[in-house]
Image: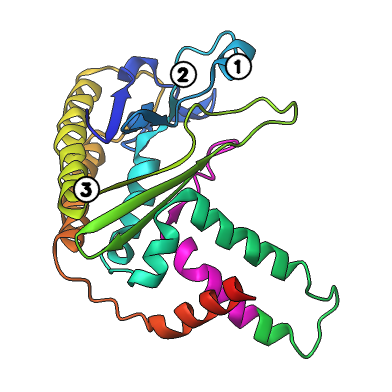
């Protein structure tokens, strides 16, 4: 089963952008469809049974949005993901329970800060950045989704851990997702293969989508067909460039010692 899965909507079923009297469609819009991640026995971006009952007319149980949103968010992380996280941090980050334990420690420490700015404010901000910056930089927060799950990626040498938080609930305490919280460790080369496999399926599917869009008469919906073809080529080329960053040695040179020291001191306090 592929790691990244999707199903595109037929172009004629995709609602255009804009007001009724001034609508348009473009490559981004044509990526509208379902998207979900298969994490062994868990499925990320799959809505819970309770949510499906609440949304009785919802046609799909997966996240239905513009799939390119996930693509853009993920590829933006590639230069960072390629950098190996040192063992003391990887051992904490590779499971949900230990990573969440660190986050709870950080939250408890932040709660001790004075409400008003003080002489310690700048030092606290700098320490907070050391404690959290390396985690935030490797996390997809899915902010475009209501109750969006969080998915973090931590590489160490030939392994990469995918750690997710998908226990979000709505105002009525109804869970959004089926995946809950968890983690998955896999070979880094397998992760690269999965990302490449996604590209090898997604861009041909988008080429078919573009071809259908070119054949269709869109009436009053504005669609720049020349630009559509150009963007298909540009998006594929950009993905290939970003993928290459995962395949080569990282050029990042993070000074990990202050981060390790800050984390260890907090956990021992």
Residue at 41% over, 84% down: 257
SS category of the residue bearing label 2: loop
In the image, taking residue 187 as reference, residue 155 lies left or right, namely right
Position of the C terminus by quadrant: bottom right
Residue at 65% over, 79% down: 125
Q: Are marks 3 and 1 in contact (CB under 8 Å)?
A: no
SS category of the residue bearing label 1: helix
Q: CA distance from mark 3 to mark 2?
A: 25 Å
Identify the residue at the far front of this view: 268
Depth check, front residue: 140 or 106:
106
Question: What crowding class fits label 1: few (fewer than 14 Cα within 10 Å), some (14-19), or many (20 or more)?
Answer: some
Residue at 78% over, 91% down: 119
Sequence order check, earlier mark of 3 and 1:
1
Q: Which residue is mark 1?
A: 50
Q: Which residue is mark 2?
A: 61
Residue 214 vs 143, above or below: the answer is above
Residue 116 vs 176, above or below: the answer is below
Residue 130 visible from this viewpoint: no
Depth check, front residue: 174 or 159:
159
Sequence order check, earlier mark of 3 and 2:
2
Residue 149 vs 217, above or below: the answer is below
Which span is picked out in magenta? 125-149
Residue 191 image label: 3
């Amino acid at each position: 089963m592929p790691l990244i899965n999707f199903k595109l909507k037929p172009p004629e079923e995709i609602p255009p952008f804009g007001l009724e009297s001034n609508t348009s469609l473009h490559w981004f819009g044509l990526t509208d469809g379902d998207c979900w991640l298969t994490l062994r026995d868990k499925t990320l971006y799959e809505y819970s049974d309770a949510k499906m009952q609440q949304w009785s007319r919802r046609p799909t149980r997966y996240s239905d949005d513009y799939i390119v949103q996930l693509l853009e968010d993920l590829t933006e992380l590639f230069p960072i993901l390629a950098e190996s996280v040192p063992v003391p941090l990887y051992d904490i980050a590779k499971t949900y329970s230990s990573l969440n334990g660190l986050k709870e420690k950080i939250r408890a420490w932040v709660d001790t800060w004075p409400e008003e700015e003080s002489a310690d404010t700048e030092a606290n901000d700098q320490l907070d950045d050391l404690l959290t910056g390396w985690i935030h930089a490797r996390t997809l927060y899915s902010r475009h989704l209501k109750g969006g799950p969080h998915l973090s990626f931590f590489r160490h040498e030939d392994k990469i851990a995918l750690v997710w938080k998908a226990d979000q609930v709505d105002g009525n305490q109804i869970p959004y997702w089926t995946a809950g919280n968890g983690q998955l460790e896999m070979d880094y080369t397998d992760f690269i293969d999965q990302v490449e496999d996604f590209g090898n399926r997604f861009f041909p599917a988008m080429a078919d989508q573009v071809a259908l869009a070119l054949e269709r008469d869109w009436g009053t919906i504005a669609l720049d067909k020349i630009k559509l073809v150009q963007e298909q080529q540009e998006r594929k080329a950009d993905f290939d460039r970003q993928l290459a960053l995962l395949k080569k040695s990282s050029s990042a040179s993070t000074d990990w010692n202050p981060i390790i020291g800050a984390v260890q001191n907090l956990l021992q306090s």
